[in-house]
């Protein structure tokens, strides 16, 4: 078993640190969550990271200054901010264009929620599950035309640029101080997190699922985000088995 002093905690955001909401804009970050993440960051001597499909701009808008000292892999690993430095691909105008085209195809009245990101476009059909096949077909058409990748998630098809995924993000983070030499524990809930769990395990760590969706790919399963937050509090309180048992 790994010593807690050498533990690195890498956490997904939506569905993991906070419950999944009906729409991306409905998610909120409480002051208690900000304080808990800050305390965990101190306890782990900086070895805490958030790995999210959201863009860095979206995460900063939700978290504010509380993320300034946290390592962030955003946009499925295409954006990486560590030690105040940002690594990201050049900006592209394709996603605003596709957002307009998707809105023209479906329109908000049909219940498809369009999430424009810095390096991606989410097409959420949670409010209109009957349109799943139509959204998938449209995503495939857009991906083929513009040489994009489709990332399927919890009732969402996301278009993103080819390249990094969350597994690549975990590997990049674990090469950097203060993460290098520690044992990663990755916690996530959705299909996008499978690659990150695999990367953590390849590096000698563990993967933990929140909820049943990807439980078969993980070493352990937590009930829900509230269960994760309890584990983080236990870790801060000195529980050596909070994430490693």
Image (cartoon, helix red, strand yellow):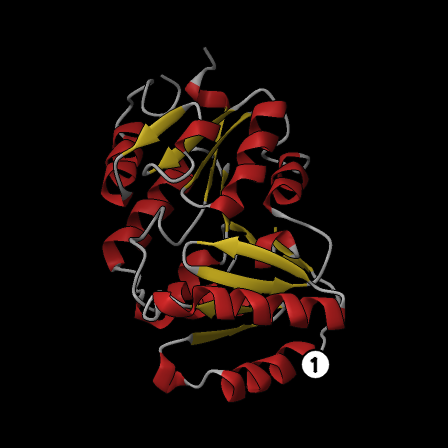
Left or right of residue 144, residue 112 in this image: left
Q: Is residue 215 visible?
A: yes
Residue at position x 24%, y 37% from top? 227
- Relative height, residue 150 to residue 71 (above, below): below
Quick one: 106 or 197, which is closer to the camera?
A: 106
Quick one: 76 or 2, which is closer to the camera?
A: 76
Left or right of residue 33, residue 134 in this image: right
Quick one: 213 or 50, which is closer to the camera?
A: 213
* Location of mark 1 (residue): 93
Label 1 environment density (alpha carbons within 10 Å; few <14, some 14–19, many ≥20) = few
* Picture coordinates of residue 230, whole percent (x, y): 23, 36
Left or right of residue 3, residue 34 in this image: left
Q: Quadrant of residue 66?
A: bottom left
- Relative height, residue 232 to residue 53 (above, below): above
* Picture coordinates of residue 218, whole percent (x, y): 45, 28
Q: Is residue 55 visible?
A: no
Residue at position x 54%, y 81% from top? 102
Q: Judging from the image, what secondary structure is the residue with disc 1 in?
A: loop
* Picture coordinates of residue 150, whole percent (x, y): 62, 59
């Amino acid at each position: 078993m790994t010593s807690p002093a050498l533990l690195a905690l890498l956490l997904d955001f939506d569905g993991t640190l906070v419950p999944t909401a009906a729409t991306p804009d409905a998610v909120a970050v409480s002051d208690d969550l900000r304080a808990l993440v800050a305390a965990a960051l101190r306890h782990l001597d900086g070895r805490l990271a958030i790995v999210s499909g959201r863009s860095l701009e979206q995460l900063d808008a939700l978290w504010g200054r509380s993320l300034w000292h946290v390592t962030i892999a955003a946009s499925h690993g295409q954006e990486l901010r560590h030690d105040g430095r940002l690594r990201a691909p050049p900006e592209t105008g394709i996603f605003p264009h596709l957002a307009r085209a998707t809105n023209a195809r479906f329109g908000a009245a049909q219940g498809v929620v369009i999430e424009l990101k810095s390096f991606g476009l989410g097409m959420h059909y949670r409010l209109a599950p009957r349109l799943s096949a139509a959204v998938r077909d449209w995503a495939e058409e857009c991906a083929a035309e513009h040489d994009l990748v489709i990332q399927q998630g919890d009732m969402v098809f996301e278009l993103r640029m080819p390249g990094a995924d969350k597994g690549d993000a975990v590997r990049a983070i674990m090469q950097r101080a203060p993460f290098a030499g520690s044992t990663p524990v990755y916690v996530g809930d959705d299909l996008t997190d499978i690659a990150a769990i695999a990367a953590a395990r390849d590096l000698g760590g563990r993967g933990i699922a929140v909820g049943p969706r990807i439980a078969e790919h993980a070493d352990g399963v937590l009930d829900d985000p509230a269960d994760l937050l309890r584990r983080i509090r236990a870790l801060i309180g000195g529980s050596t088995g909070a994430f490693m048992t």
